[in-house]
Structures are given as C-alpha cells and as structure tokens.
Image (spheres, helix red, strand yellow):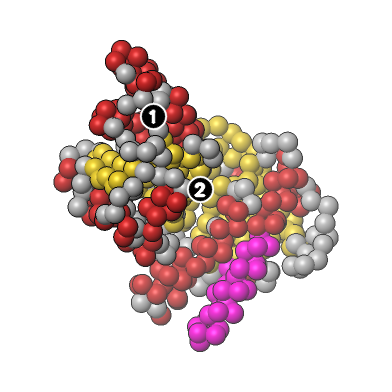
Amino acid sequence: MSAALIGATAEAAVQEISDWLIGEALGTVDLEDLFRALGGRLVSAGLPLLRGHLAMRALHPMFETVTVTWWREGGAETEEIEHGADTRARWLESPLYPLVERFLPRLRHRLESPGDWERHPMLHEFRQAGGTDYLAILTPFGDIETARARQDGVIISWVSDRPGGFTDGEVAVLERLQLRLAVACKMAKREETAANVVAAYLGADAGRRVLDGNIQLGDGEAIEAVIWFADLRGSTALADRMGEPAFLATLNSFFACAAGPVLSHGGEVLKFIGDAVLAIFPLAGPDGAQGAAQRALAAARETESRMAALNAARVEASETNLDYGLGLHTGEVLFGNIGVAERVEFTVIGVAANVAVRLQELTKDLGTPVLASAEFARALPINWRSLGEHRLRGVAEPREAFAPPALGSV
C-alpha cells in the first residue's frame, strides 16, 4: 500500500471518505458528481486508480440501465441504456457478465499476466491504457434471492495502473467503501425511481408537485394554461373490428402522434382518457401566453405530420386511416388533486378545460382536425380562419372557433 495509506494516516483518510459518502447519501445524490468526486478523493488518498465504473438497473419507462464511468484524467460520464438496445453481444463479452450471471460478490483479473481476462476485449483496452489490475464488486439491494431475481443492486469496478496492481489493503479499503457508496446509490435509485414513476404516470410537473407534498385531496392551485384535448375518432368501431392486441397497438400509435409532440414541445401530458389526451402548456414563464401558444401550435403541427405518416403506413398495410380532433384553449384551470381521500388524481378542472373538450367535439361538425378558441388565437398573430360562433355543450356563451393556417403556411 502506498505511503498515504499506512497506519493511522490511512485509517483517517478512509474514515473521512466514508463519512463523506454517508453525508452525501443523506442529501440529494447526483451519481455522476458523486462518482467523480469519489474518484478524486481516492486518488488523493493514495489509491492507484486509473478508471472506475458504476452500473445499476433503472426503473424507468425508457431506460434499462444507468452507468457512470470515471477516468483519472478524463472526469466522469453518465450513459443511459434504453430498453431493447442492441447491446447483447457487447454484454456477453463484458467482464461483468459472469459476475451478474452467477451473482458473485466480487471478481478480479490481474492484467499483467496471461489469464481468463484475455477473453474480454474491454480488458485488453484497459491493458493497452496501462491497466494492471481489475476489481469488480457487486452489492445487492435487499436479500440475495430477491435482489438476484430483480437484478437489483450496484456493481462498481476499478482499474489500477500501478505495477503489481492493488494490494490486499487497498482491496479491503475499496470493499469497505463499496458499502457506503452502495447506500448512496440505493438512495439515488429510490429517489430517481420515485421521480420516474410519478412523471410517467402523472406528468413531470404534477409528479414534482406530488413529491413536494401535494398529495392530499384538494391540494392544488389556479393556473393559467393552454389546454390541449385530442381525441381519436371512431375508436369504438375500430375496437369492434380489431382484436384487443391490434387495437391496443393502434391506440398507442395514436398516442405517440397526439401526446409525443406535447412532450417534445415542453407541454405536460396529464392523463389518457380512453382514446383521448389531456395536456397543458402553462403560461408561467418569460414568454407567457404567446410562448405557450406557439409551443402548443407547433405540437399540433407535429401531430398533423405524424398522423399523416402513420396513415401512409396504414394504407401501405391495407389498414384504414385514423382520424382525430384537437381542441386548443387558453384560460384558468384548477391544477390539483381530485377524487376521494384514498385515491386521488392530479389533473386540471374548470370551464377552460371544458371549452377545450367541446372545441375538439366541434371539429367533427366543421370538418377540420384542429380548432382553437379566440383566447388562444389572440396570442398568435397568424392567418387564423374564423369558422364563426358556436354553442358548446356545457358552456354558457357562444364561442368563436378558429382553424389554424394549413401546415407549412403562416
């Protein structure tokens, strides 16, 4: 072991890092920042580290695994691996594969001598970069059998570039600190999982509000927003004609067209109501009503483009076209929890939300896929086409409806 890790000096350095890790675990953990700082502290304490790598399963609708890689001279970088990503061949060649498949507590390869490590292309890369020793440690979250079934835990690997590799004392230090780092990783994963779950089921902003404590029936506030309501037409007939799996696939294709653009343009998808999408574009922010309306209209144009592409593919497959309606309105809504005490839902309610729904219904009669209210159109000085005033069910006064310019024009 190096001079910096001898006797009382070693114990003090390790204990300081240990206490720091626990302190970080009790705060808001950013894995990339944490791992970068840990690598620097370990090097300063005398450990001969060239590289570190951290990997955990992610409970996320898009990503399967999150990794952080640290290099002594290159900082740290996070990678999120998507579900279904074509990484199987690379994973089978990874030195971590046998560790996970056999759920071993640790694995070590000494890179200065011939051995099993030569089967792994990645270890050859480390050897060419000056690596002499490779140590990987697996820490499960919870009991072994449950953690193995769920692949729930953290793997941390280290590469040394000192001749002779790690000493037994340095391995003991890394194993000791692994447990503290694993606590921080578990806390980060649980917090990230909570945020991912509420964002996936409630929407990002609603999810943040829930995690901030707005969980009781009646919690909420009045906000100004663009309300977006899109609905798939003829869905009952489609469901009757198709089998359940085919209809579900069709419905998800429609939602990709009608909800995906909302997210890509900064809106908030609140809920899927059968075959409809309820979303908002809050007016809060430096660009106010005009900016929210611009984003909503851009999302509407993207929806139109996506639906055209989807229908072209459906025609190619000898399937019928899908039709839809979209209502856009700007107004005040109550954004909060409704329902019963045992089961609440974060959504928007109020006259403004009803106007958006009724405008969507009016698209069927007026033969246009998108209709906007005067309040929405007023925020955007473009060539709106007035379609006259109309009575909307449940709305006291007649409302003027506007169709946006054709796609590609202003």
Q: Locate the C terminus by quadrant.
A: bottom right
The amino acid pointed to by label 1 is Leu
Q: Position of residue 139 (x, y in %)?
A: 26, 39
Q: Locate the N terminus by quadrant.
A: top left
Report whether residue 223 is seen: yes
Task: For mark 1, give the secondary structure.
Answer: loop
Q: Residue furthest top?
A: 8
In percent of the image, x 48 and y 40: which residue is there? Answer: 71
Who comes first in sequence, dot 1 or dot 2?
1
The answer to whether marks 1 and 2 mark residues whose Cβ atoms lie closer than 8 Å is no
The image shows residue 209, relative to residue 97, as above or below, that is above
The amino acid pointed to by label 2 is Leu
In percent of the image, x 55 and y 79: which residue is there? Answer: 313
Residue where numbered disc 2 is placed: 270
In percent of the image, x 51 and y 48: which residue is there? Answer: 270
Q: Which mark is residue 81?
A: none
For the residue pair 9 and 102, the one nearer the viewer reads as 9
Q: Position of residue 294 (x, y in %)?
A: 73, 51
Give the extent of the magenta segment.
300-324
Residue where numbered disc 1 is placed: 47
Report whether residue 153 is seen: no
For the residue pair 348 and 23, the one nearer the viewer reads as 23
In percent of the image, x 29 and y 15: which residue is there? Answer: 7
Q: Position of residue 185 (x, y in %)?
A: 36, 35
Q: Quadrant of residue 404?
A: bottom right
The image shows residue 402, relative to residue 112, as above or below, that is below
